[in-house]
Image (spheres, rainbow, N blue to C red):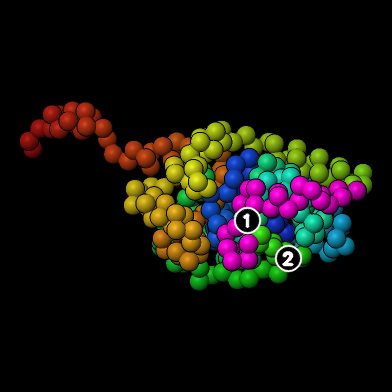
Amino acid sequence: MHQPWASLLVCGIKRIEGRSWPSPVTGRLWIHAASKIPEEATIKAMEDFYREIYAVNGVTDLNFPQHYPVSRLLGCVEVVGCVRCEELTSWEALPEGVRLEGQTDFCWLCENPQKLLVPFEMRGYQGVYNLEKKIYESAVRGLTPVKAPLPVKFPLPDARDPFSLKPGSIFVHLSENKSPTVEKSSTLSAAIAGARAAATQFNKKNQDIQTDSMQNGRPDSFAIGRSEKKTLEDNGFNEGTSVSAKKEQSCRIKNVESSSRDQRHAELKQHPGPTPNVFAAALRGLKPS
C-alpha cells in the first residue's frame, strides 16, 4: 500500500480499506508500505479526513504516526469481510465515522491491527500474495497490539459463520430500513473531497487484470512466485479457513504499489530462466578451454 494509507491502517485509525474489487482474502493480512515517498499535501489531506470523521463520533485526540516509512513491512490487520459501499454506508450497527470511510465500490473490513516494533525493509509486489516463510517467522515475533482510537467490531450476519461478511450479505437487512445519512458539515465535506483527490493520484494500471483474475472470492494470478504456493492458497480459500490459521501456508501480504519497476520485476519472477532457444545458442557458443 502507498503511504500514508499503509501506516494509518496498521495504527488502527483506518478501519476500511477501499477498493474497486472485492477482497480475495479473509484473515490476517500483512501490510507493506510501497516505495513512493508521500507528499506532505497527501498526508495532510488524509489526516484532515480522519480528524473530521472521528469528530463525528466525538473522538478528537487522534495520534497520527510521526513517520510514514516506505519500502517496509509495517504490521498486519484481520480482514473479517468485504461489503459494498452502499451496504457499509447504510449499516446502522456501525458508528457514523466508520460508515463515512466508505468511499469506494468495495470496502474491506479490518480489525485487530498489530504493528511491528521494528518495521523492516523488504521488497513488495503488486496485489495480494504469499509472504515468504522466513519473513513471516521473523515478523510474527515482532508484532505488538495497537490501541486504536475507536476500535470497531463488525457484527457478523451469521454468527455461526465467521466469514459471512461478503458483498451482498447484509444488503437484504438494510434495503427496507436504511439509516439516515450523516449530516455533513462544510469542513467534513471538504475533508472527504480532499481524501478522494489524494487517492486518485494513483492509477492502478493492473486493476482490470486483478479483477479478471478473481473467482469465487479468491486470487488466482497475483504475484505468487511458485506454483506450489498457488496450490496452497487455492486450497486454503476453498476450505473457507482463516488465513491466520494457515500461518506458514497462507500468510498474505497486501501491496498495491503501482510502479513500472515492480511490474517488470513481477514479470521476471514469472519467467525466471532463459528461453530454450537462448540457452541452446549459448551452448553452441561454448569452446573447450
Q: Which residue is mark 2?
A: 151
Residue 171 on the magenta span:
yes
Residue ID at (37%, 40%):
270
Residue ID at (64%, 37%):
202
Residue 283 on the magenta span:
no
Question: Disc 1 marks which amino acid?
Answer: Leu
Mark closer to the observer (1, 2): 1
- Give the extent of the magenta segment: 158-183
Question: Disc 2 marks which amino acid?
Answer: Pro
53 to the left or right of 274: right
Residue ID at (57%, 59%):
163
Instruction: Please identify the quadrant where the C terminus is shown.
Output: top left
Q: Which residue is mark 1?
A: 165
237 to the left or right of 170: left
Label 1 and label 2: CA atoms lie apart by 18 Å
Residue 60 image offset from top left, x and y in percent: 86, 62
